[in-house]
Image (cartoon, rainbow, N blue to C red):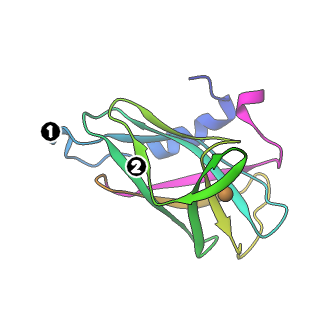
Amino acid sequence: MNRGTSLLGAAALTAGLALTGCSSSGGPELEVTGAFMPQPVSDMAAGFLVVRNSGGDADRLTSVTSSLSENVTIHETKNQAMRMVSSFEIPAGGELDLERGGNHIMFMDLKERPKQGETVALQLHFEKADPITVDVPVKETTYNPKKQ
Ligand SMILES: [Cu+2]
């Protein structure tokens, strides 16, 4: 993992919220890192992050909610076309990567357009684990941590 240092703040913020009990049952243990939203240039926006699962059980990301939009879905990208999916797997001992050019969170009909430097609060909902709230920093429109 090689994430930009500017993302460490978000990781530190979410780490404390990631887990509440149940570790003795061997269930999923989820942690969110590297979240960002490129500053939107229309009434649509995308969100990217990594969900790491250090537990012994797989889980699934089933939905995302946010005060930014009533219309938030999760999309995969195949052959350069994006398609809504009902959930994403988070394998035991693995991670779910939402990254530019690939899987992502899609926000439609934005109630406002957040600016670079602001944050957007998301709630990630899972099949098994408790929901996780993430404060996602808004980056410049072309931001891509993989290309820095
Ligand atoms: Cu999309």
Of the two numbered discs 2 and 1 on the same chain, state the one appearing first in sequence. 2
- Helix, strand or loop status at disc 2: loop
User: Which x, y percent locates residue 84?
Assistant: 57, 60
Image quadrant occupied by the N terminus: top right
Residue 17's disc number: 2
Image-based side of 123 in relation to 92, left or right: right
At 14% across and 38% down in the image, what residue appears?
24
Residue 143 sits above or below residue 4 on the image: below
Image-based side of 118 in relation to 133, left or right: right
Residue placed most toward the observer, 37 or 103: 103
Residue placed most toward the observer, 19 or 142: 142
Residue reaching furthest front?
79
User: Badge 1 local density, few (<14 within 10 Å), some, or many (20+)?
Assistant: few
Q: Can residue 67 be found in the magenta stretch? A: no
Residue 27 sits above or below residue 73 on the image: above
Identify the residue position indicated by label 1 in the image.
24
At 34% across and 29% down in the image, what residue appears?
93
Q: Which amino acid does label 2 sit on?
A: Leu
Quadrant of res 109: bottom right
Q: Which amino acid does label 1 sit on?
A: Ser
User: Which x, y percent locates residue 145?
Assistant: 71, 33
Image quadrant occupied by the C terminus: top right
Residue 53 sits above or below residue 139 on the image: above
Residue reaching furthest left?
25
Q: What stretch is highlighted in magenta?
A: 130-148
- Helix, strand or loop status at disc 1: helix
At 59% across and 34% down in the image, what residue appears?
8
